[in-house]
Image: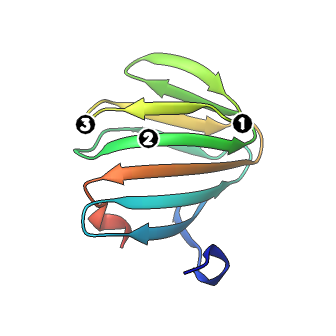
């Protein structure tokens, strides 16, 4: 498959994702609008976030940092987190197990 063939879904306001699922994991390729926020939440899935472009303010378990291109964040199962795009961003998330609600 090729990402250009995968339709984009707006999962939450300002977060446009191309989603790929296997039996045990999901990948999300996000294009995020400037100032788009994801409210604090947690989920049972482990998550790895990679910032590919832009600046993304991310709070993990109460600790806030600004991440840029090349930064990778490990998010454990059920750990509260939130974020805000300070600029337009491209992010990649990997989830295990599969994010069923993104299918």
The image shows residue 21 at horizontal and vertical percentages of 37, 69
12 vs 46: above or below? below
Of callouts 1 and 3, which one flags the residue occurring earlier in the amino acid sequence?
A: 1
Of callouts 3 and 2, which one flags the residue occurring earlier in the amino acid sequence?
A: 2
Q: CA distance from mark 3 to mark 2?
A: 11 Å
Of callouts 1 and 2, which one flags the residue occurring earlier in the amino acid sequence?
A: 2
Instruction: Kindly check if marks 1 and 3 are in contact, taking CB atoms under 8 A apart as contact.
Output: no
Q: Residue 54's quadrant in the figure?
A: top right
| Label 2, residues with CA under 10 Å away: few <14, some 14-19, many ≥20 | some
80 vs 34: above or below? above
Q: Residue 69 bears which disc, if any?
A: 1
Q: CA distance from mark 1 to mark 3?
A: 24 Å
Q: CA distance from mark 1 to mark 2?
A: 14 Å
Could one spot residue 7 in this view of the protein? Answer: yes
Would you name the residue on which mark 2 appears? 48
The image shows residue 96 at horizontal and vertical percentages of 29, 51
The image shows residue 86 at horizontal and vertical percentages of 73, 35
31 vs 39: above or below? below
Would you name the residue on which mark 3 appears? 77
Q: Quadrant for the N terminus, please.
A: bottom right
Describe residue 41's horizontal placement relative to residue 82 as left or right: left
SS for dot 3: loop
- Judging depth in this view, the residue of 85 and 72 nearest the camera is 72
- Look at discs 1 and 3 and give the one toward the viewer: 1
SS for dot 1: loop
């Amino acid at each position: 498959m090729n990402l250009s063939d995968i339709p984009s879904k707006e999962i939450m306001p300002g977060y446009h994702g191309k989603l790929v699922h296997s039996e045990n994991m999901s990948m999300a390729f996000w294009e995020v609008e400037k100032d788009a926020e994801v409210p604090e939440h947690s989920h049972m899935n482990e998550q790895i976030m990679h910032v590919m472009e832009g600046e993304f303010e991310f709070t993990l378990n109460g600790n806030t940092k600004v991440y840029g291109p090349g930064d990778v964040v490990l998010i454990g199962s059920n750990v509260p987190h939130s974020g805000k795009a300070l600029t337009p961003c491209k992010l990649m998330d990997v989830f295990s197990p599969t994010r069923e609600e993104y299918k």
